[in-house]
Image: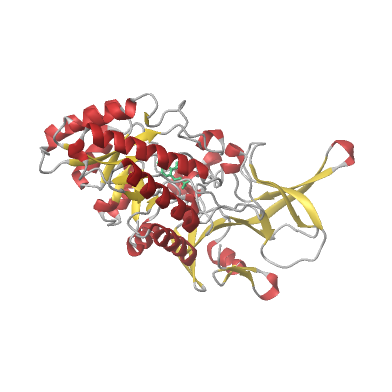
Amino acid sequence: PRNADRGPGGALRLAGVDVRDLAGDYGTPLMTMDEADFRSRCRDFANAYGSAEAVHYAGKAFLSSEVLRWLTEEGLSLDVCSGGELNLALRAGFPAGRITLHGSNKSDAELALAVEARIGAIVVDSFDEIARLAGLVESADRGEDDPIPLMIRVTVGVEAHTHEFIATAHEDQKFGFSLAGGAAAEAVRRIVVCRGLRLIGLHSHIGSQIFDPSGFEVSAHRLVGLLAAIQQEHPELADTLTELDLGGGLGIAYVGSDDPPAPDAMAKSLLDIVSRECQFAGVATPHVVVEPGRAIAGPGGVTVYQVGTIKDVALDGGLVRRYVSVDGGMSDNIRTALYDADYTAVLASRDSDAAPVLCRIVGKHCEAGDVVVRDCYLPADLVVGDLLAVAATGAYCYAMSSNYNRVPRPPVVTVAAGDTRLMLRRETDDDLMLLEKW
Ligand code: LLP
């Protein structure tokens, strides 16, 4: 986070809060979210794209009612990808007109909820979905004067350089309508014949944790080409097809050597490309929209664990690997096990000038793959009871957490200007029994 430093005794402070106090007040493991960090990243994107509303925070990265309040106050829009996320947003009073709903297999109930709540747009992902929406138009009695706003998700054929599981716009995957194969143009035809549906935008999401901006540039270029082709075929759409959504995916630094592009530099080049190419193609420049999740929520999150066991394991060749076991693990951060993600950790409860030792930080789960940090250096005098902090856990950690081994989820604590506030309480064993029929 932007607001981390070392205080008395060399203990880590997050937004001015000593991690020893956090551990004492809330127990470990715990996750912190730095409010000022989160909000400042919202503003960075809003400034970069010239409007807060053009920035659709991707709720899948991390969502809670408090985060929704920050987003409402910052004026951002919101991207949700399930009825669960949509329901939380509506319940928290997030303005429905600023929500878009994604998903490659939305249920009838999810579509009906979105239509009834009059959200900003539904991003359609298949011909089946268009047919189902056409049916909903009938039953919801939505006609030409009150159409349901849609965007179509386009597979632009870009290979983003990221982990295979999170790269989404090359052709051989489940999302979107293929541009090259003509499915996107056919989707437009099926939408325009239904008077209760209105196409307001084109959408593409090329992947996640991306450092190389060229993939977004190619995607923008191809979407403008499609926009021009659509307007030629359907000139009546010129006034209403006005959004170009380039999706999320901007990467963040997980370890010190990472150097992701800044939102403003990337925005400038994307906005330039879109306006230049629109001029060239003779179409009005659309509003450029983006959907960052990780780049807003990720850096401000820190997980604090307590060391429970330290074990030196002999490897071949006389080497030793120090396994440091903490009181959480793959249930609060599956990303290392799932994506081979890089994280790093520091001794957080004190300073030490002991020599650094190569360590592997592992969790408490009954699985050898339960690794939190594959390799990092910790001081040789590390002892049981020390606190460790793992940085950049704000996105896709709590959001992907589980109760594997019936381990309750940690709390999420807001840190702000030297103060703390419980955002999400710790799960209890009783919570885990709520679904039992006995
Ligand atoms: N928009 C759409 C349509 C998406 O599918 C996603 C992410 C985003 C926006 C936000 O992308 P971001 O800016 O956060 O990269 N669980 C994986 C990431 C999966 C991302 C899925 N879609 C991880 O932990 O790395």
Q: Looking at the rendering, which quadrant does residue 229 occupy?
A: top left
Q: Quadrant of the N terminus?
A: bottom right
Give whichever of 51, 327 is nearer the camera.
Answer: 51
Give whichever of 312, 185 is nearer the camera.
Answer: 185
Q: Quadrant of the C terminus?
A: top left
Residue 224 to residue 303: above or below: above
**What x and y, as percent, mark residue 78?**
34, 51
Indicate left or right for 315 with 101 as reference.
Answer: right
Q: Residue at x 27, y 47 (%)?
A: 284
Indicate left or right for 400 with 195 as reference.
Answer: right
Which residue ends up furthest to the top in the rendered image? 181
Q: Looking at the rendering, which quadrant does residue 237 occupy?
A: top left
Q: Residue at x 12, y 39 (%)?
A: 142
Whether residue 296 is visible: yes
Q: How many numbered discs sit on the rendered protein? A: 0
Give whichever of 407, 290 is nearer the camera.
Answer: 290
**What x and y, as percent, mark residue 258?**
63, 52
